[in-house]
Image (tube, rainbow, N blue to C red):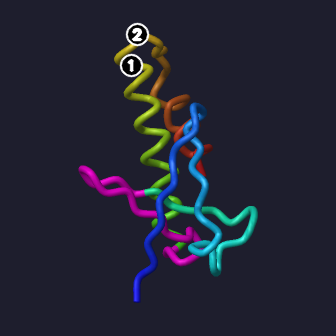
Amino acid sequence: MNKIDITKMSSKGQIVIPQELREGINEGDKLVVIRSEDQIILKRADSFDKNLEEDLKFAKKTEEAWKDIDEGKFKKTSSNDFLKEIRSFK
């Protein structure tokens, strides 16, 4: 049977996972947070395929880059320098 509990978010955006629901999750474990409309899902990162973890890192860097572009914080670079920077993302 599924377990249900209530928690709240702090002013810093932190959420405590109630003790009864922490089984199998240890301090320092990485969790993937997935949001779909009004649902938030937490999954242990080690249960995902390594490629997905790399894809999520790339997606985060891409999102940050688009934010910088929208805020006018981008820089012009040569195509060679651009490719070197992209290769460093790994």
* Mark 2 vs 1: CB contact within 8 A: yes
The residue lying toward the viewer, choosing from 18 and 38, is 18
Q: Position of residue 35 (x, y in %)?
A: 34, 53
User: What amino acid type should be assigned to the residue bearing mark 2?
Assistant: Gly
Residue 89 in the image: state x and y as whole percent. Answer: 58, 45
Q: Quadrant of the N terminus?
A: bottom left
Q: Check residue 35 for magenta coloring.
A: yes
For mark 2, what is the residue?
Answer: 72
| Residue at 44% from the left image edge and 20% from the top image edge | 68
Residue 88 lies in quadrant: top right
Q: Which residues are magenta?
A: 34-49
* Residue 26 forms part of the magenta stretch: no
Against 48, residue 86 (above or below) is above
56, 36: nearer the viewer:
36
Nearest the viewer among 11 and 65 is 11
User: Residue 36 at x, y = what percent?
Assistant: 28, 55
Q: Where is mark 1, residue-wise?
A: 69
**Residue 21, horizontal then vertical, whole percent:** 56, 73
Residue furthest bottom in the image: 1
Check disc 1 and give the amino acid type.
Answer: Ile
In this view, 29 is above or below 86: below
Instruction: Residue at 24%, 50% (x, y): give it.
Output: 37
Of the pair 18 and 42, the residue shown nearer to us: 18
Mark 1: few/some/many CA within 10 Å (<14, 14-19, 20+)? few
Q: Is residue 89 left or right of residue 56?
A: right
Give the crowd class for mark 2: few <14, some 14-19, many >=20 residues within 10 Å: few
Q: Give me the residue at 48% from left, 22% from top.
A: 78
Q: Is residue 85 left or right of residue 33?
A: right
Displayed quadrant of residue 71: top left
